[in-house]
């Protein structure tokens, strides 16, 4: 025993000395160079705090907002969403001689990051790849109508549709619709070579990646940033703290608890736009929620002001109907399909044969606090009309699986449409099932009306068709809307030129970093 | 009248701790009587009121629920989880350690090597994570997961004690008198190894409370809206910079409770452990 | 002696085998489809069934469980831990990147805890009275303080208010050593608080026990000064249980730094593990668990062997 003690002591002695030295070194380093992290703009490099670590990029596949962020910087498609609507990007111009013909003229001298030229052939092969369902490409639905893609010459492509599609150009402006080299058109090559303003630099897993300006970009002269150093900050508070402490210049996805902290800071700008909408989805396979009257009752029971304040500190707006694209003839349609009216909800329940209510399970998730708080708020509202709801809150992965398998009675979700055109609703009202739409819900009347609007070439006819669809929507309640949440970016105020796109496209606002710069 | 040894172990501070624990237990039993509000009743117009607001002594949380009432009801869940997990760990660990230490040989390999060492080789967080993802979150899952997680410590303590006790004269005497194995294990050996196990009990409760709050922070705690202290801290953490009371109030209760259990553990050790007889 | 070591190593390999089998089975029991998850990031259109099926095939998830198990085992034996479902990164490389970071963090936290905890505990035991009860209270708070709460407070104060240190993140030692060390300070302190408290408490009670031992009285009666007895004998003999606690603590810390890593956005091994479970990234989970298990078991063997060398009675 004593041997052990003595040996131990001798070793401890020397180790302690070494370690003490190390501590001294650490403290010296900290004392010496404790910088404030303030903005001494020696260069135009943007330090960006990104809300998730992007997964390996797969061509054409929707992989979440972090990945889309990179897509908007590294890649370009034929079209681009801007604050002024959908504009040509790689295309210099688009001609539509008739509603089913689109002639794209590419800009001159386009090249990919690897130096190879970007020609009409690349457009053809990329779009044909995205039109195949088994590639996992998310714009499949939008390209279904393509009858042929013809290359006229190096810079001209003619796409012929089998029938008119009012949302076609919008689909081409989705970040995953980027034109990529043929070598990227498979599931195994990382989709890192594009024709966008920034080229893929160096990725350090779990830490961050660098993006370098690309001299061959078609508007390279307008790119002011010397590069972007992306750091991954999955935790919302850590991300906000990084911006507040000056560790980064800009962050995406500001969590709502942190809105006021950033707004109160002198040198920071918070840019919020209404983005995804929250709603209650139903399992209509059997049970009470197969009855539209019960679904209506839920839609009338929800106290939307409460839910908005509980989950988002009122950063957003309540939604008594369905999100419609702003600044279009559709914007006023279907905005008041339901309202908070518990008495009406109780009547509807009684009419459906449940005067004393019933019990049900509600699927939420423990991973996203805003969904959990929304669920808690809705739970209380439903209790008031006699529906006794038990929460099921697995992690996000479990939530996806249960949602996809219909293992719930009702569930709360937050979602965006891939496009803003009213036809985005098609994904919510017909098969196939997925985790965030009402399980087994199928209403061909709504589908028919929405498709009619998509095909119509006359604006009045389009509006009338959507109006019809929304009328049925209000009665049949494919989902019960709750609110539209504000989605925010935040940055140091000397960053100019960032433009926040409103609506579903707010996640893609990083397109405008191509023309952003630090000033003053 | 208390035995002299126990009286010596109970310093005034430890009496305060004892009083606190009793008070918590009373609240646990009679939460509905004491709680001024329904712990689940939301009113977001009253969200994040500071402590001292009329009618809401300790303020409200982000959904406008009364923090005091939630603390009272939360004590039920918290103690259920902490005590449940600790008891489970103690029973499991003691049995395993006792068997391993007493029988030796193959039993020892199976219990201490295969059982305990394999468990210890798993990072604790992964055990909890897997349990929660497998069974779904909830108090029952937490009790089982944490019970299994804390069991190896009890097993090791019991094992070590058993080995040193089983060669002593009175155990040999019991064997010589022909006492059956179970009698020897539970009536002769167990009482003589129990002091450090009981001390470990109070330490483990503190660990359980702490782990519960950590798991809540990762979204693996009890299912809302049921309040637990850990989930209240985890929720309040989001408002640390702007409305710190939502975190500080339940945080203070956790610290006080762990402090109280720690003090009682010290008292227990002094009382039960003959070696520290002369201490103080 | 050699036989003893070989026996321990053989048992260790057996343990690792058990651990990796258990983790493999547990993961495949857990609900959640990695392929579905890869294609559903929750803020956009969801994947078509064809696409999900294709990804399942790519990941080898459509094969029978036994085949997957066999592939996994033969991979491990040849040192190939597979590739991450999410990032396609080689799992062994990912662990090689992350493990040193966590070791560094745990090492620094342990250092702080030892340097502060042992003298503190010894001081409290010797002085008694107010110092002692204050120590008991403070260490109880230290033990009871959730690490994510304390970490957030540190950030609020030192990063946001005083702007002395960055709020979190990571910089590699090779590229920016100054920032690398700065970034380590706050997480290490946050991690060290609980550990310091545990060590201080352990030291306190061990020293207290020693102070009342008969041989201390004997030494004093032999005319040795109180100070000399304490320095020379009491402290030294009290350290054995403390060293045991430190050893155990370091082992536990290795797999439990996730909360600190989360708060400080520190890309260590523990957060890799938790994120991988969340994403059902089976190869990464398996790889990290095996790594931690091997480390843990190896440390145990080394400790046992040292005990065996020092005390022949342990070798049987």
Image: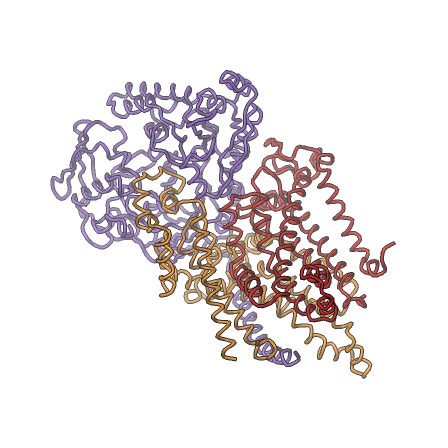
Chain colours: A purple, B red, C orange
Q: Splitting the image into 4 quarters, where does residue B198 fall?
A: bottom right
Q: Splitting the image into 4 quarters, where does residue C227 fall?
A: bottom right
Q: Residue C148 vs residue B79: left or right? A: left
The picture places residue C174, in percent across and down from the top left corner, at 42, 67
Q: Residue A388 vs residue A490: left or right? A: right
The picture places residue B4, in percent across and down from the top left corner, at 85, 60
Residue at left offset 40%, top offset 32%: A437
The picture places residue B212, in percent across and down from the top left corner, at 59, 49
The picture places residue B110, in percent across and down from the top left corner, at 54, 62
Extreme-left residue of the structure: A153
Give whichever of A431, B260 is nearer the camera.
Answer: A431
Q: Splitting the image into 4 quarters, where does residue A321 fall?
A: top left
State whether residue A410 appears in this view.
no
Residue at left offset 17%, top offset 27%: A98
Q: Is residue C260 above or below residue C227?
A: above
Q: Residue A167 vs residue B261: left or right? A: left
Quadrant where the image shows the C terminus of chain C: bottom right
Give whichever of A293, A303 is nearer the camera.
Answer: A293
Residue at left offset 82%, top offset 81%: C221
Extreme-right residue of the structure: B1
Extreme-front residue of the structure: B178
């Amino acid at each position: 025993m004593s041997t052990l003690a003595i040996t131990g002591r001798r070793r401890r002695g020397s180790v302690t000395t070494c370690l003490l030295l190390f501590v001294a070194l650490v403290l010296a380093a900290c004392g010496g160079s404790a910088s404030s992290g303030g903005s001494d703009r020696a260069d135009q490099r943007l330090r960006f705090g990104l809300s998730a670590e992007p997964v390996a990029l797969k061509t054409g596949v929707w992989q979440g907002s972090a990945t889309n962020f990179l897509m908007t910087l590294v890649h370009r498609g034929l079209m681009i969403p801007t604050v002024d609507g959908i504009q040509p990007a790689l295309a210099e111009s688009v001609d539509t001689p008739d509603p089913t013909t689109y002639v794209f003229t590419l800009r001159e001298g386009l090249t990919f990051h690897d130096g190879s030229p970007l020609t009409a052939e690349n457009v053809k092969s990329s779009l044909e790849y995205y039109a195949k369902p088994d590639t996992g490409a998310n714009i499949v639905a939008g390209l279904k109508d393509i009858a042929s893609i013809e290359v006229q010459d190096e810079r001209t492509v003619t796409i012929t549709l089998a029938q008119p599609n009012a949302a076609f150009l919008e689909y081409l402006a989705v970040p995953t619709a980027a034109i990529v080299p043929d070598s990227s058109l498979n599931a195994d090559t990382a989709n890192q070579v594009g024709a966008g303003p920034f080229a893929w630099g160096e990725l350090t897993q779990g830490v961050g990646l660098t993006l370098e300006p690309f001299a061959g970009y078609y508007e390279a002269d307008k790119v002011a940033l010397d590069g972007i150093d992306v750091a991954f900050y999955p935790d919302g508070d850590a991300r906000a703290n990084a911006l507040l402490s000056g560790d980064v210049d800009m962050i995406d996805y500001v969590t709502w608890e942190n809105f006021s902290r950033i707004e109160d800071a002198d040198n920071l700008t918070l840019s919020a736009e209404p983005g995804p909408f929250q709603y209650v989805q139903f399992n209509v396979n059997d049970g009470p929620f197969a009855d539209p009257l019960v679904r209506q009752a839920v839609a009338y029971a929800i106290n939307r002001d409460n839910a908005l304040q509980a989950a988002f500190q009122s950063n957003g707006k309540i939604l008594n109907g369905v999100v419609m694209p702003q600044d279009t003839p559709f914007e006023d349609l279907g905005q008041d399909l339901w309202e908070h009216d518990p008495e009406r909800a109780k009547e509807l329940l009684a009419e459906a044969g449940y005067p004393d209510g019933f019990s049900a399970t509600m699927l939420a998730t423990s991973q996203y606090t805003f969904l959990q708080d929304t669920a808690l708020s809705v739970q209380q509202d439903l209790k008031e009309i006699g529906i006794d709801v038990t929460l099921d809150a697995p992690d996000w992965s479990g939530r996806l699986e249960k949602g996809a398998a219909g293992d719930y009675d009702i569930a709360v979700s937050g979602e965006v449409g891939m496009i803003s055109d009213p036809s985005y609703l098609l994904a919510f009202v017909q098969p196939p099932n997925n985790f965030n739409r009402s399980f087994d819900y199928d209403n061909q009347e709504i589908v028919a009306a929405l498709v009619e609007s998509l095909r119509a070439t006359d604006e009045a006819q389009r509006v009338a068709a959507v109006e019809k669809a929304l009328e049925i929507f209000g009665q049949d309640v494919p989902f019960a809307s709750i609110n539209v949440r504000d989605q925010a970016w935040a940055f140091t105020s000397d960053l100019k030129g960032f433009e926040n796109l409103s609506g579903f496209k707010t996640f893609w606002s990083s397109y405008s970093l191509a023309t952003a710069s630090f000033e003053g | 009248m208390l035995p002299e040894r126990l009286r010596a172990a109970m310093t005034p501070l430890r009496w305060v701790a004892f009083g606190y624990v009793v008070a918590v237990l009373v609240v646990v039993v009679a939460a509905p009587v004491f709680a001024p509000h329904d712990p689940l009743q939301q009113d977001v117009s009253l969200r994040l009121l500071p402590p001292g607001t009329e009618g809401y002594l300790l303020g409200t949380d982000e959904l406008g629920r009364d923090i005091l009432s939630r603390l009272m009801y939360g004590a039920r869940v918290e103690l259920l989880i902490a005590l449940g997990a600790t008891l489970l760990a103690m029973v499991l660990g003691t049995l395993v350690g006792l068997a391993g230490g007493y029988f030796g040989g193959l039993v020892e390999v199976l219990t201490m090597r295969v059982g305990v060492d394999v468990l210890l080789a798993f990072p604790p967080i992964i055990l909890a994570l897997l349990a929660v993802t497998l069974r779904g979150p909830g108090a029952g899952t937490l009790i089982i997961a944490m019970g299994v997680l804390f069991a190896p410590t009890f097993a090791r303590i019991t094992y070590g004690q058993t080995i040193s006790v089983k060669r002593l004269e009175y155990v040999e005497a019991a064997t010589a008198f022909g006492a059956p194995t179970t009698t020897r294990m539970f009536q002769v050996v167990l009482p003589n190894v129990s002091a450090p196990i009981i001390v470990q009990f109070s330490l483990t409760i503190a660990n359980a409370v702490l782990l519960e709050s950590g798991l809540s922070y990762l979204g693996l705690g009890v299912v809302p809206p049921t309040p637990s202290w850990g989930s209240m801290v985890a929720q309040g953490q989001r408002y640390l910079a702007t409305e710190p009371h939502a975190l500080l109030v339940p945080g203070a209760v956790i610290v006080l409770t762990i402090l109280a259990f720690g003090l009682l553990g010290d008292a227990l050790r002094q009382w039960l452990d003959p070696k520290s007889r002369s201490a103080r | 002696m050699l036989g003893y070591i070989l026996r321990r190593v053989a048992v260790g390999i057996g343990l690792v085998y058990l651990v990796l089998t258990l983790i493999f089975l547990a993961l495949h029991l857990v609900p959640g489809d990695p392929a579905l998850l890869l294609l559903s990031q929750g803020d956009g259109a969801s994947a078509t069934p064809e696409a999900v099926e294709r990804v399942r095939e790519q990941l080898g998830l459509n094969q029978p469980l036994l085949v997957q198990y066999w592939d996994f085992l033969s991979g491990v034996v040849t040192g190939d831990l597979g590739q991450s479902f999410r990032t396609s990164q080689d799992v062994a490389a990912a662990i090689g990147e992350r493990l040193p970071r966590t070791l560094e963090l745990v090492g620094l936290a342990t250092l702080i805890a030892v340097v502060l905890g042992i003298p503190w505990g010894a001081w409290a035991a010797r002085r008694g009275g107010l110092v002692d009860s204050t120590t008991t209270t403070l260490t109880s708070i230290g033990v009871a303080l959730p690490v994510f709460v304390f970490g957030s407070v540190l950030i609020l104060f030192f990063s946001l208010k005083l702007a002395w240190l960055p709020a979190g993140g990571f910089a590699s030692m090779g590229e920016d050593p100054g920032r690398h060390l700065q970034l380590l300070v706050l997480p290490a302190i946050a991690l060290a608080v609980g550990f310091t408290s545990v060590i201080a408490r352990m030291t306190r009670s061990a020293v207290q026990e020693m102070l009342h031992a008969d041989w201390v009285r004997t030494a004093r009666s032999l005319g040795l000064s109180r100070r000399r007895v304490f320095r020379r004998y009491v402290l030294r003999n009290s350290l054995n249980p403390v060293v045991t606690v430190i050893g155990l603590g370091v082992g536990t810390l290795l797999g439990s730094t996730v909360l600190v890593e989360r708060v400080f956005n520190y890309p260590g091994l523990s957060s890799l593990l938790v994120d991988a479970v969340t994403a059902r990234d089976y190869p990464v989970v398996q790889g990290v668990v095996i790594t931690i298990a091997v480390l843990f078991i190896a440390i145990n063997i080394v400790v046992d062997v040292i005990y065996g060398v020092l005390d022949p009675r342990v070798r049987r």
